Image: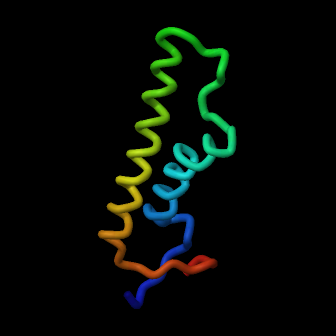
Amino acid sequence: MDKTKPFWASWTLWGAVATFIGVVLPGFGINVAPEAVTGFFKSFWQALDSILTFGGLAVTVYGRATATKQLTKTRS
């Protein structure tokens, strides 16, 4: 891994951010879906939350497994 890329271009980073939003924030009482939503839209928001969580995890694993460049703080 002698090549580098900026940290914001990392699939692993963005997958971890999506997983964080779906898992950690609700633990602190911060929900992606508003509490006033009912009926179909409540189910939609719950499904979106699950997709965000599992999709983020999948992107994180994919990004780590296919990484070919080292991350840097600056552009290379």
The number of numbered discs placed on residues in the rendered structure image is 0
Question: In the picture provided, is 27 more to the left or to the right than 71?
Answer: right
Foreground: 19 or 75? Answer: 19
Quarter residue 74 falls in: bottom right
Which residue appears farthest toward the top when viewing the image? 39
Colouring method of the image: rainbow
The structure residue drawn at horizontal position 39% and vertical position 46%, both measured from the top left corner, is 55
- The residue lying at 57 percent from left, 11 percent from top is 38
- Quarter of the C terminus within the rendering: bottom right
Q: Nearer the viewer, residue 69 or 19?
A: 19
> Residue at point 49% right, 51% down?
19
If the image is split into quadrants, where does the N terminus sit? bottom left
The percent coordinates of residue 73 (x first, y second) are 62, 78
Q: Quadrant of residue 67?
A: bottom left
Q: Residue furthest bottom?
A: 2
Q: Is residue 73 above or below residue 1?
A: above
User: Is 17 displayed left or right of 67 in the figure?
Assistant: right
Task: List x then y, in percent, for residue 54.
Answer: 39, 45
Relative to 33, 1 lies left or right = left
Q: Residue at x 48, y 27 (%)?
A: 46
Residue 64 percent location from the top left of the image:
37, 69
Q: Is residue 48 above or below residue 21?
A: above
